[in-house]
Each structure stands twice: as structure tokens, then as C-alpha cells.
Amino acid sequence: MPPEQSDLLSLCKRRGFIWPSYEIYGGVAGMFDYGPLGCVLKNNIVEMWRSIYKNREGFVEIDSETVNPVPVFKASGHVDEFSDLITYCEECKEPFRADHLAKGLHSNPDILSADELERLFEKNDVRCPECGGKLGKVEEFNLMFKTTIGPGSSRAGFLRPETAQGIFVNFLNLYRYNREKLPLGVIQTGRGYRNEIAPRQGMIRMREFNMMEVELFVDPDDKGWERFPDVENEIMTLIPNDGNEITVTVGDAVGKGIIANKVLAYFVYTTQQLLTALGLDLKKLRFRQHLDDEMAHYAADCWDAEALLSYGWTEITGIADRGCWDLSRHAEFSGVDMTHFRRFDEPKEIEMDVVKAKHKALGPKFKGKAKEIAAAIEAKAPKDIRNGTITVTAGGETAELGEEFFEVVRIKEKVSGERVIPHVIEPSHGLDRIFYSILEHAYTYDEKEDYVTLRLRPAVAPIKVGVFPLMDKDGLDVLAASIYKELQSGGIPSYYDTSGAIGRRYARMDEIGTPWCITVDYGSVEEGKDKGTVTIRDRDTREQRRVDSKDIVKVINAMLSE
């Protein structure tokens, strides 16, 4: 059974994992601060994510701005598409996300339109959950936070709702950095902002949140992946969009057409590797394919990693095939070429339509500027012609030219390659949701002993070792302090504690997920066979064994490496 949400959140607050933001002023819904232990756990999650994508996969990392000008999100579709449906109580004026009020009344309220939700509320007499008042009109509410760039309101902007666009607008820089080769993998971690209507699910729905996003640019014809054979026999639990849960190998998922291609399947399984390494219970993890009517506007296909929590099955990571949506849109809105040059094995002779300038017409009309305008015309493609006109910029001036100044002709040309718009595979990880999922899956409560243990994986545990002198005297404290300093100097986060009975100290460490505790007792300092040995206690088994104190760093490092 998952823990009670209140019990886990109480532990998190008491022990310094997370705190409600601005609590002394009453708090703000959907906002949390990370405490000392929470910061370390969060950073450990990020480092494990980096170890896969940077170290194993060889992806590069960037860090882009959180404030973006409006054209970025106009191109991405967020200005027009990034909305939830909202309704207000006509009595108490409390806002509600409309589809949340329809749960239990429809199999998938997310797909309903505003009119459909209004009819559903009327049919089922759905009223305000707070005061019982009548609900008002259902309307769209854009989730982006608006801001301005610079003084006054001369230039509007938005706080980014995702980190992905910072990667897309930097594609040309990244492509050149990668010596104009594909595939090109890029990662970024950072804050995102969504002005959620009524966040009531703790860390699952936050207004300011942390993301770990991966954008893999691939040739649209390249459906394979070099390391796919390493995982093709591994098992995953999938729910395709027919709704039937299946257990299948990665290879069969592709072979049977459940997952479209090997690249997408590889990173679905890579997500499973990451989440289980972080400590999520594989039995409480599945991948659900988006239904056609819930697919994001940019996605050709998408799979959600869902963890079973006290909230039910909850999305914590999305692995999307974004197709060529992002680069083609930014190319269209910016006028910048965002293509990849795909080289042929052998040059090919092809027929192609090109735009040619009519120099005889340009000369008398534009005189000294005619040559520059002709070059601008011939840099255009036939697709740039709109209603018999073409728009060019020359000498800092823009002109719209009719067909008397240009023509489309077919030519034969030997070419060494062609330009294509890369496709994008995106594993997008909700860091805060993963953080909370790890805590829920690690939380265990022994009702008989009234005892809480947080069974965190050693790799993510904020503190790896607790160090205790049995008594704070007789040289036990001196040896314990020296062991603590040696562990800290060796890069092993540790905690030194002398207060209270030894059982109390173990309990404190168990509650924050510390995997091991070292106790220095009188046998550690007395003459005899135990001279120089200390006790190491395992959190999960509670077994104890004696280890030579001079080997302690080596022993802990060996256990950390499992």
C-alpha cells in the first residue's frame, strides 16, 4: 500500500526534504522549496540522468534562458494551443480546472471541448465542490506566465513552460558544434513555469517546476539505433492506445508495430532503466501510449512513463516522437534554414525547379540595387512564391515583387546530397514528480513497531553513512570523528551524531534513507582481537558486521558501487 500523502509530506517537512513555499505568509498552491536533504536528493537524480545521457550516450548539455520573447512560443504553438479549460463558481468565485470536475462522469474528460463539459455538468448537476454554487461558463485559460522584457511593455515575453524550445532555437549552433552530423543528442535541465488553474496534488502539479529534457535530432529516414541490440530482449510493460496492458520485449514492441521505430523504443526502455536505477519499483511502473485525441499538437507519437502512487497512475516522464514540427515551425517563423545536409553515397543528377531573376526587368527598375535583389530572388525556392509574388530583403529594405521580375524554371543538376529537416525524439522527465515518486516507493511503515524506513537506493540517498560513537567520551568520540572526517574527505556524504540512545540515532537515519550506520564502541578502542574495528549496520536488513576502521572508505565505496 502506498503511504498516506499527509504522512509522507509530514516526514519531508520535518526532515528537510521539501517545504511549502512562503509558508509564513500562508503559502502558495503548487509551489515548494527543497530543503537541505531534498536538494541533495534532487541533485543525485540529475547526476544519474546525466550519467546515462552525457556519459553513456554522449549527448551534449546546454543551459538556455527561462524568459523567452513571444515569437518563440508563437512558433512552437504554445500561444495558441497551450491551454486548459477553466470554470468559476458563480457564488464563491473559486476557479476549477473543468476536466477535473468531470472525473467519474466520462472515460477521458481531457478530450472534451468546453461545450461538451458544460453539457456534462448540466446533465449531472455538477456544482462547486467548495460551496455548492452553480458553475459558470467553461473557457480556455493559457497556462504560460506573461512578462515583459525591458522597461515598460514594449516587448512581451513568457516564462518558458518547457526547456525544449531553448534547444530548438539553438539548433544551428549545436549542429555546427557537432560538425553538421546527425544524430545529435542534447540535454538540458532547469526550471519551467505553468500557471496551473488549481493545483491540488502536491508535487505532482506545480506552478514552478524542474525538468530534465532530452532532444535527439535524427535523420528522418534513420529508424535504427546503434545500441538497440543491447536492449532488444529486455522486458517492458506497455499499454498501447487500444487500452490492453501487455508485457513485451523491446524488440517485439517494434517488430509488432506497437512502438513505431527502434529509436523511440530504445529511449522508452532507457527511461525504464533510469527510473528503476533511481529506485522506482518496476512492479509499479508502466508505459502508456497517448490516445490520438490526447496527443500534444507537436507529437507524432508519445509514451508516458507512469508510476503507481497514492494519487493513482501518474505520468512522470513523456517520451515523444515530435517529428519535424519544431524545426520546421521555427524555420517558418524566423526565416532561418534549419535543415540537415544528407550526403549521397554517389552524386546524383536530378531535375529541380528553381527561381530565376529576370535581369532585364530588374535593371531599369532598381538600377544599382538590381544585382543584390537578383541574388535575393535566386536564394528563394518555388515554395516561397505566394499568390504570384515573392518577398525579398536587400540593402535593409523589403520588397514584394511580381512575376515580371522572376520566373520558375526546371534545371538538371548533379548534386552530392539533399537538405532534410531533422526529426526529434524527446524523453522529457519531470524531476519533481520523479523525486516524489522515489520517496513514495521508498517509504515503508512497520505498524507493529511504529517505525518508518525510507528505503532509498544508495546512489540517490542524500546521506550515505551515519557515524556514531556509542558514548561521547573515552576516546570513542575521537575515533568516530576521525572516521567521519575520512568519509567526508573521501567524497562520501556522512552525518555525525552523538545525541540520544543508539536506537534513536538509527531510527533518525532510517527515516531519511541513510543506507548504513557505523558505530564506534568500546571494542573499537580496547586492546584485543577487536582493536581498530567498527560495526556497520545495514538499513534494510538491520544486519551488523565488524570492519577494520582503516578500510572503512574502501568498504563503503564498494557497497556504493553494488
Image (spheres, rainbow, N blue to C red):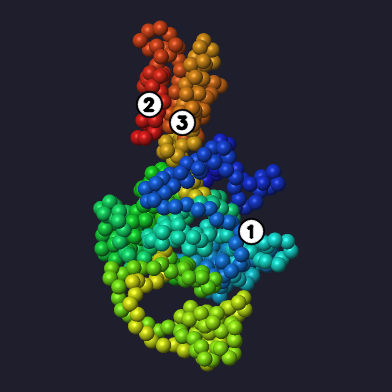
Above or below — where is 140 with respect to 483?
below
Above or below — where is 127 with respect to 27?
below
Q: Secondary structure at mark 3?
A: loop
Q: Residue 223's quadrant in the figure?
A: bottom left
**Residue ID for mark 1:** 130
Q: Nearer the viewer, mark 2 or mark 1?
A: 2
Q: Secondary structure at mark 1?
A: loop
Above or below — where is 173 with respect to 7?
below
Determine the residue positioned at 51% across, 43% down. Answer: 42
**Residue ID for mark 2:** 555
In the depicted view, which residue is nearer to us: 497 or 106? 497
User: Type of residue at label 2?
Assistant: Val
Q: Secondary structure at mark 2?
A: helix
Residue 524 spot, x, y in % from top left: 43, 14
Lower sequence index among marks 3 and 1: 1
How crowded pointer 2 is (Cα within 10 Å; few <14, some 14-19, many 20+) is rated as some
**Cα distance in 3D space between marks 3 and 2:** 11 Å
**Cα distance in 3D space between marks 3 and 1:** 50 Å
**Residue ID for mark 3:** 492
The quadrant of the picture occupied by the N terminus is: top left
- In the rendered structure, the answer to whether residue 325 lies left or right of residue 64 reads left
Q: Residue 194's quadrant in the figure?
A: bottom right
Could one spot residue 247 in this view of the protein? no
Above or below — where is 214 with respect to 341?
above
Per the rendering, the mark at residue 194 is none
Determine the residue positioned at 37% across, 26% down. Answer: 555
Residue 480 spot, x, y in % from top left: 49, 19
Determine the residue positioned at 30% across, 76% down. Answer: 348
Lower sequence index among marks 2 and 1: 1
User: Type of residue at label 1?
Assistant: Glu
User: Type of residue at label 3?
Assistant: Ile
Q: Mark 3 and 1 residues: CB-CB less than 8 Å, in contact? A: no
